[in-house]
Amino acid sequence: MPVTFTVAQHDLAPVEGLSESRVKTAHALLSPAHRKECKELFNSSFGNLDAALPAADPVLYNNNGLIHTVVRAYNLHHALVLRPDDIWLAILVQFSFFVNEPGNSKRLRGRFVAHEGQEELVVLDVGSRYTADFGRMARTMTDLLATRIVDPQLREWIVPDFSTTTENDRIVASVLMMSTLQEFFSYTFGMLCGLPRVTLEGERADWESLVRRADRIQDYGGDAVLWHRLLMPVLERFVRTFDACAGSQAGVRDDAELHAFWSKIVHWRRGGSGPSFLSGWLTAFCVFDAKGKWIPDQREDMENERDIHLLLDGAAYPIVQSGDIPAGCAGVPVKLDDNGVMFDTLMVAGLAGSRVLSTSDEQASDVGRFDTLAPLAAWWLFEKAPESPNVPTSGTRQADAKASGSTITHA
């Protein structure tokens, strides 16, 4: 529990001039040097864009949050509150300065990394520069750093875990870890398009049944075995998503692994003057072309790309060139006997488009209308166009039609 120590017998003095000196926005709290460098503020610990600071606890700007806070409290008779996190973060800032001194960074390189130069580390997330959770991305970056440095425990040493530590403290420490190691690493935050939310309709038993049905595919051998390896990790996570969302308002947001899974459903990379590519676990549903041939994986053509490799339970998901994405429908010829008149028809079925739906949730979108998409299942039966003028394909009397054996049943 906190303790309070009386240092001197002074009455506490209130902070004066708050209405004039308090900082009201995140941008205004930046140091003058950083404010000069700031073209546009995307995000901060206070919220997106240039968020207003909380009115309940006024904030004063100073160049050093520990030193000047203590000096002001000491000189003007204010009480002082300190957390172990405040002291540790002050130490980390100084440690970052120390390590990045050219002589020290050269001398200490072997203590931190085994590579030469700078290694680029990339963290990807769904959203845009205005919506991405950069704090979470910084935390993820330290996880990645821990896999690249000589001492993986350095991350645990830097990021505090006191009883007073907040998520904001962990983010601040994570950024300071990135700063400390910037001589050895460069950092990239990548934004991906993404799904705001997904609704899985039906019951849990339906999704379990889907897994069981798909499990049978491997029995057909050949490429079906490879396809099965791609399908099962995805379908099993549908069930886990259903479980995570059941009875939880937060849904998959509380499950980091499932959040990452849905964030990797698809990545569409435009190829400029060349082809575009599709990656992500969605490619498990487009592995065969219309002739049943396995669609070539384009991974080798994109070996220099850093954000396209996806593994789920050891299964590597293919990269598909946009022009190779197969149709979502399949067709079958059907002879139609309309009271003795024969027609060559084609029956086509599959997923042919998108239904545009409405959530009616005005908190999630501007008006809650036409803000949701769902696949559209459809079928058709139509008379086939003649392949050539000399080959009649319809209007033939049954007596003229040739057949080599038939099995007839009634609907």
Image (spheres, rainbow, N blue to C red):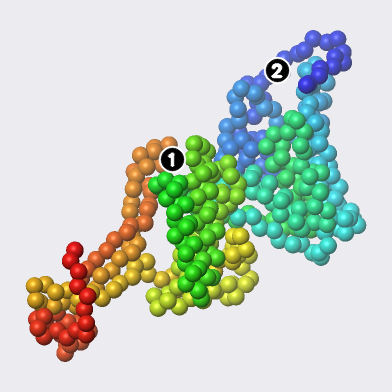
| Disc number placed over residue 16 in the picture, else none | 2
Spot occupied by residue 132 in the image (x, y as percentages of width and height) = 57, 47
Inspect the image, locate mark 1, and give the three-letter code of the amino acid beneath it: Ala
Closer to us: 280 or 71: 280
Q: Residue at x 19, y 63 (%)?
A: 411
For the point 73% across and 33% down, the residue is 165
Secondary structure state at the residue bearing disc 2: loop
Residue 72 visible in image: yes
Residue at left offset 56%, top offset 49%? 258
Position in image of residue 119 (x %, y %):
74, 62
Q: Is residue 219 above or below residue 148?
A: below
**410 left or right, relative to 217:** left
Extreme residue toward the bottom, this view = 390
Query: Of 407 and 185, which appears nearest the observer?
Result: 407
Depth order, front residue of 285/47:
285
Circle 1 is placed at which residue position? 364
Amino acid type for the residue under numbered disc 2: Glu
Label 1 CA crowd tier, 10 Å (few <14, some 14–19, many 20+): few
Marks 1 and 2, the one that precedes in the sequence: 2
State the image quarter where residue 7 is shown: top right
Indicate left or right for 115 with 194 as reference: right
